[in-house]
Each structure stands twice: as C-alpha cells, then as structure tokens.
Amino acid sequence: MKATYHKYILEFKRPSGTSRGIMTDKETWFLVLEKDGKKGVGECGILRGLSVDDRPDYEAKLQWTCENIHLGKDQLWESLIEFPSIQFGVEIAFQSLVAESPFLLFPSKFTKGIKSIPINGLVWMGDEGFMKEQIEDKLSQGFHCIKLKIGAIDFNKELQLLGYIREHFGPEQIEIRVDANGAFDLNEALGKISQLSEFKLHSIEQPIEKNNTDRMAELCKTTPLPIALDEELIGVFTFDEKDQLLQKIKPQYIILKPSFIGGFRGTQEWISLAEKHQIKWWITSALESNIGLNAIAQWTFLQHNLMPQGLGTGGLYTNNFECPLEVFEGQLWYKKEAYWKFTLTDIMKGP
C-alpha cells in the first residue's frame, strides 16, 4: 500500500466570523491511499487555532503516517491519539479504499436518496444587518432550526436579533441554538444566559472558555437554558478522562465533531458515555471540505439521532468539490443522480 498527503486551501465565499476572528480561508489536508489499482481518500480536517493537533510537527506526523500506513487503521488510530484530525483522515481513507466507490463509505437509505438528515441553518457573526440578512435567508430556505454564532458584536444587539426572530416565529416554528464559542466572561455568563433564556432557545454552546470545569459545572447545574459542551471536549483523549469530564460537568448536551475528537471511533466513545449519563448529543462538521462532510453525514445517518445535526457547511467555499450532498428545506439529502467532481489532480495542485 502506498500513502501520500496533500495540502489544500479552501477559500470562503465570504469572510466568516466567529468570536475568535474572521476567516477568509481554511487549510485542510488529504490522505490518499493506493493499493491494487484502487484509491482511497480521507480528509484531515484541522482548524488552526482550535484543533488540539495544531502543532508545529503536524506535517511531520502526516509524513510519519504515510511511512507507517502498513500498521493498519486500528494501530494507527492508537498511535495518533494526540492527532485527532489525522485519526479521522486515516479512518476515512481506509474506508474509502475498501468501499465499492471511493465516496460511498456507509451505504444506507441516506446514500440511496430515500431518507434525509435534519440540519440546523448556520448564521455567522457579523454586523447586525448581515446577521439579519442571513436569518431571513435561512428561514426562506425552509429551515426549522437555526444556529447563531454570538459573542462578537454588542450583546444587546444580539438580544435584539433574537427578539426580531421571536416576534415573527415562535419556538414551535423555529428552534434557535446559539453558540458563544467561549466568549462570555466567567462572572457574567449566568446573567447573560438568563437574558438569552427569555427567547425560549434550544441551547447555548460553550458559554465560557474550556478548562474552567468548576465554573462550567456550576453553570450546568443552575442554568435556565440547556448548555452544550463543544470546545470542552477537545484534547480529552482517553475513555476514562471523557467519563470523568461528563460526570463532573453534567452538561445537558454535548456536540461531537469527529475531526476534533478522534474520528468516528472517538465520537462513538463520547456517544456511549453520553448515553450512559443521560446526556443528549448531536454531530457537527468542522468546516471540512465535502470529502470530510460526506463521510460525517453518511456515518451520522447510521446513528439514528433525530435531532437537527450541524452538517450544512458544504456551500461555504468557492473551491469545494462538487458532490451529491444537497440542502433542501432544512434537510441534507444525498442526491443519487448527482456525481462527484473530484480528481487527485485537484488536490495535488496544492494551495
């Protein structure tokens, strides 16, 4: 078996804002396997500044992975425990290599175009006008669940935006999730969450920065609005550490991003522990290209979680790869009649 890796820069159609700043492009890496005339491709979806494996030796570890590809998927997963995005890429690449088609990884009623996956519509941070425009666009597209990134503009303006939505759409019509990306001050968080709860929201993701576990546990105990852990899960590697974290904080939800938490195997560990502790969960992509998004969507369908998932990011880039994934009426569909427009030449061109 031969393995190679390739860097690719995804270009945003429009600068996209989070509480950590504005992004105009996003780096990703592809792992390509070749054996007996067949090829498999996986995506190592690192997000600089957030992924735990954003390290100076990242590319060296990709090179090591290619040189040791003979170890196989399971042994590589163990060896790559501190590089969850590479674990994810390895899983996809091996599955792609043995699949009937390189991108038909987990056949199901989803990949046959019979069933769809409910998803939330993502509203990016920006000025009030831009966020309002996005909200109206998502509602016109038929979404019944929207997720707003908050924490970058004036909090009172964000409250006004939520008030604007609720004036026109009740909670039975539109489910609203908000994501603070850890932006709230530790001492102000509960007060802000209380104000947000007046708008009958579904949940708030990561209200305060990760690693403040004592404070997060207090918030989850006293909050009037369900709290979902997101960044808090990043860098928690062992099964026991994951169990201890959930037992200590006792969140209402956890959000699972395979690129950040050790691929599907790592995600499955979190799911089993969440269900053990009666914590609800959903799965979200992490700005991967359609290669990674396709894998996550196909795997997510098999988990039979009926909540809206966070899988609607495929249309963010100018140079993404054409694929059968399509968003319609707030659902992600796999359109069988569509096709993949992807060649190894595309990714080997580099940035």
Image (spheres, rainbow, N blue to C red):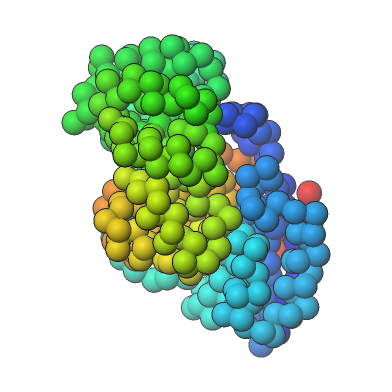
Residue displayed at 60% across by 75% down:
78
Query: In the rendered picture of this protein, how many numbered marks are placed on residues?
Result: 0
Residue 324 position (above or below residue 191): below
Residue 81 position (above or below residue 39): above
Residue 34 position (above or below residue 213): below
Query: Is residue 302 rendered to the left or right of residue 258?
Result: left
Q: Which quadrant would residue 318 be assigned to in this image?
A: top right
Q: Which quadrant would residue 20 be assigned to in this image?
A: top right
Q: Nearer the viewer, residue 91 or 109?
A: 91
The reply to whether residue 132 is visible in this rendering is: no
Q: Nearer the viewer, residue 168 or 53?
A: 53
Residue displayed at 39% across by 71% down:
107
Could you tell me residue 34's position as x and y percent?
69, 79
Q: Nearer the viewer, residue 162 or 135?
A: 162
Could you tell me residue 225's position as x and y percent?
30, 32
Residue 134 position (above or below residue 89): above
Residue displayed at 81% across by 64% down:
60
The reply to whether residue 170 is visible in this rendering is: yes
The N terminus is located in which quarter?
A: bottom right
- Extreme residue in the left direction: 172
Could you tell me residue 345's position as x and y percent?
74, 61
Could you tell me residue 271's position as x and y percent?
37, 62
